[in-house]
Image (cartoon, grey):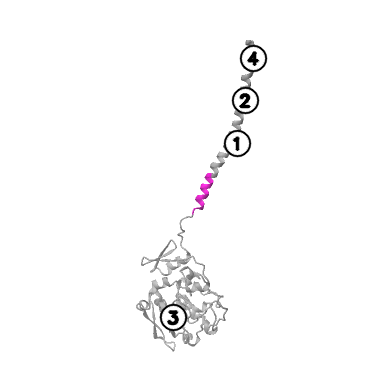
Amino acid sequence: MTKKAYIISAVILLSAFSGMMIANSGCNSSTAGSSEPVAVDSAVNEEAAESSTEKSTPTSPDNSIPEGASILMKCYPDFVKGYKEGKLQMSDGSTIVYDDGRQKSFVQKLDDADAEDMFAFKYDRKSWTPEYLQDAGRSRCELLFKKMYGASAQQVASKLINVKWFDANGNYGGASVKFTPVNGAAEHLKAVAAELSKMPQFKKYYKSEGTFYWRQVRGAKRQSAHSYGMTIDIGGNYKTYWLWSNAGASETAKIKYENKIPHEIVEVFEKHGFIWGGRWYHYDTMHFEYRPEILMANP
C-alpha cells in the first residue's frame, strides 16, 4: 500500500470511529434523559410517602372540652375542676372517665352510665308530653354523684340540713325536710318553698312524700337519686308513676302517660335548678331532683 493510500484509509477509519462514538453518545444521552425523570419521580414519591405517613400518624388526643364536661364544671365547680385527656379532673385530685367509649342500649345508659351518658337524652321544656325513651336525668354517673354527695348512707346523712317545708295541710313552715347543702341544693329548695308559699291555690300538692333515702331504684341495680339527698317527692293523692299505670311494662315498652301535677309548680322547681320526673317518658310526676346540668344542656 502506498503512503497516500494508507493515509486515506486511516482517515476513513477515524471518521467511522468518530461516528460510532457520536452515535453511542446520543444513545447514552437518550438513556440518561429518560432515566432522569424516573429519578425525579422516585424522589417525589418518597417525599409524598413521607408526607402521607406523617398525615396518617395518629395525632395526640384531642383535649378540647366536650360540652357536657364544660357544663359539669360550671354547675359543680366545687368538685369538677377541669377536663384533661378524656377525664374529669376532680377537686380531690382523682379523675373520672367522661366517656368510656362503649356503645350502650337505652337500659345500659341508665344502669351503667358514664358522665357523657347523663346528656344522652332530651329534657324537653317546650312540651308536656315526653317523647319515647326520652328520660333526661335518669342516667347518673354514680362515681360522680358519690364523689359529690357521699359514697354511703352515713356520708350523705352527715351533711343533711333541715329545710322549711309544708305540712299535710299545705301550711308553709308547718314541717321541714332533710336536704343536702352540697352544690347549693338546700338553698335552691328553700327558694322553691318560698315561691310556692305565694301560690296557696296549689297547696294540696305540696306535702313532702320523702327526700333522703339511701336505696336502689326499684327493679334495678343503680342508686336512686334519693340516695344523695338532693331529691324531693311531693303530690299527695295526685302523684302518678309509670309502673302504676302500666303494670309489668318493660323499660322499652310503649306506655300511657298520666300526670296530675300543675305545670305552674313544675316551672317553679325548674327555675331553681330542679328537673321534674314528669318530663320523663318513664314518668314519676312526684319527683323533683336538683340537676342544674340537665337544665343547662336543655335550655
* Res 161 → quadrant: bottom left
The residue wearing badge 2 is: 20
Label 4 close to label 3 by CB (< 8 Å): no
| Amino acid type shown at disc 4 | Ile
Mark 4 is surrounded, within 10 Å at the Cα level, by few (under 14), some (14 to 19) or many (20 or more) other residues, namely few
Residue farthest to the left, as pictured = 158
Percent of width and height locating residue 121: 52, 71
Q: What range of the chain is rendered magenta?
A: 46-57
Q: Earlier in the sequence, mark 4 or mark 2?
A: 4
| Amino acid type shown at disc 1 | Ser
The residue wearing badge 3 is: 232
Q: Calculate the distance from the C-alpha at mark 1 to the C-alpha at mark 3.
A: 85 Å
Q: Nearer the viewer, mark 1 or mark 3?
A: 1
The residue wearing badge 1 is: 34
| Amino acid type shown at disc 3 | Ile
Q: Calculate the distance from the C-alpha at mark 1 to the C-alpha at mark 2.
A: 21 Å
Q: Earlier in the sequence, mark 2 or mark 3?
A: 2
At mark 4, the secondary structure is helix
